Image (cartoon, rainbow, N blue to C red):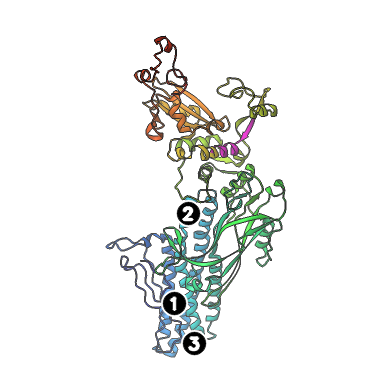
Amino acid sequence: MFHNPSSSVHQLHPPASVADYYAHQPMDIGGGPPSASDSFAFSHAKVSPAPSAQTPQSPVAFQLPAEFVQRHNVTAEVYQSFKDDVDILFSGQISAGAQNELVTRILATGEHLAIAMEAEKQYLMSEVLCNWAVQQQKLSVATHWTQQMNYALLSSIDLQFEYFGELLEQTLSGLGFLITEFPKFGFEQQHQQIRHLAHLFLFYSIIVSKQPPAVVVKCGEAENHRRSRFWFNTEIRVLGGKAFGLGSSAENVQVQCHLITDETAKRLRNNAYYEVNEHEEFVVDPANAPLKNVVEMGGGMATMGDGGETMAMVAKFDDMRVSKKEQLRRESVAQKRYHLCYTVKLRTQKHQIELVGKKVSLPFAILVGPKADVEAKLFMERSFADFVRRPDGELPKVVNGFEMVNALEMKFQALVALSQKSDSVALQQPRPFSAVSRQHLLNRLKPNRNGLISVDSFLKMPAAEEFCMTKSKANAKENGAGGGAQSPPGSVASGVGGGTTAEGEWKLVPFYEWFFKLAEMVNKYFAQMWNDGLILGFCGKEEAEQLLCQCNQPTLLIRFSDIEYAKVKISVRDQYGTIRHHWYEQSELQGRSLGQELLQNSKYRDIANIWPQTNLEFAIGTRERSVSVSTIAQRRPRQLQPSTVYFDNQNAGMDAHGGARY
């Protein structure tokens, strides 16, 4: 069982499975300065990079990256030299002349220790925490499962911060004793330097560990059961503060939250003491939350227990809601960006370091109605703008092609995972894109020779066409006029060329709208088939035919239409090797599931597999078999004794012999 580095003032024993993994004796700071006869003992032994080869491996070993272990051991070695000399100085066994020489050596070692600590602090802040925050921003468009994987890394980061924080605290305590016993020797300057370093380290260790979504939409189509039309969860977390007593002094301290505009966020970056007031157009609730110690369990959280050693100090803002103060037009707020601003006021139990300041979230948009183009722009900003290192940065004009496909994959997974009937979020591992789909999307976005893709290819480039009927024709269709369902001009079924017709016209659809619509269709109509891997998805006609030609049995392949907006294509290779393509509109999938269609439509009667080699009936159910001739004869009326001529030229309208379906 792993122990908290600062949980005791006595010698801490390492886990039995890693005998040389971690051991230290914290500095005794009780009762004032030590006497000459007392041993002034404080130590921080090096951290071994790996468990002993003779003992079972401990999960603790995998929480600390090798680079941190190497860097921390450099600091620990300098600290050990500092500690050994201080122990000798307070032992009372050296002469007055040797004492002055030893004090000079301790001062020199203290300077080296400050340099080593600054280097380790820079590594933890600029590399470990900054890289995590960059990933947090990119993954904020992904599913909750994917975000949780990144969130779980905070346990390891917290542990790294605890190791370094304990070194800082012990050094400050040691310098405090040296100032008391040897005033005006220069230890005051070193104490001030380390205290300033500790202040920066502790304040920037307070992070927004859960960010608001990129877009908060007030949707008129939202289901009535939703608790709020604006709800999301955010969180503030304190890393590495236990050695300074923040685990107890910060308990139940309230963290305030305000909704601010992008302009206010820029003022805060120039003036940390700028007074923040609630934004005039919106109000956020809850406006405050207490810091609590919680126990981490398998990447999640639980109420604090008696024996939990892996603790986290967090302030949870659950079910946050944004409300309008006044009637607003959609366009008036669509282009604005907002932030959540958290006001933190803490004081460490040890050394009384005040941590007062504000933490600002990533930018997001608040909409009073669905607006896909704004969501697309925010999606690109979260995926490719570097708000962590450059908060005022702009969205780049070109991005790496493979990074674009990765972002599209995460966004598609998130849209598919949206719950239709409840507010609960299921932590289910999303299905990744196939290699075929990834390559197809990459090709459709038209990368240049260097593999770079223009952001406008996603935001503006036409990717499909949608047939829009004229108002009179649309009204007639709604009223039931005009006969049965007809194919739009230019579609696969009509055989007529595209363009403007008397009934309507074809409208170009940008890539983002085509992409978002397909994710919405998967979410509403065949999410389970998608998660089961039965739908290939993004694949062109020629690619589908090449894949089907590799199949030995009659096989169908389910893909999305590249040209026609909001259509699904079923590509079929029959027992004779003939390949056909059938399309389905969104309206046709509303009353009949895609699985039922594949089982009951005679077009797919002889198909054995769903691409690549999944048995169709095993995957989606057993077909209804056609009734045999003997069974039909048994089902004919007999009691009125009709003549045999009565049954001539008669059969069921929807059976396997006379109808399209069976």
Instruction: Name the residue carrying label 3.
Output: 181
Q: Is residue 512 magenta?
A: yes
Look at the picture and state if 188 lies above or below 162: below
Separation of residues labelled 2 and 1 (CA atoms): 41 Å
Residue 230 position, x and y percent, is 61, 52
Within-10-Å neighbours for mark 1: few <14, some 14–19, many 20+: many
Q: Earlier in the sequence, mark 3 or mark 1?
A: 1
Instruction: Name the residue carrying label 1.
Output: 82
Which labelled disc corresponds to residue 148? 2
Within-10-Å neighbours for mark 2: few <14, some 14–19, many 20+: some
Q: Residue 469: in sight, yes or no?
A: no
Look at the picture and state if 615 lies above or below 495: below
Q: Amino acid at mark 3?
A: Glu
Question: Which stretch is magenta?
Answer: 507-518
Q: Is 381 on the left-hand or right-hand side of 622?
A: right
Separation of residues labelled 3 and 1 (CA atoms): 16 Å
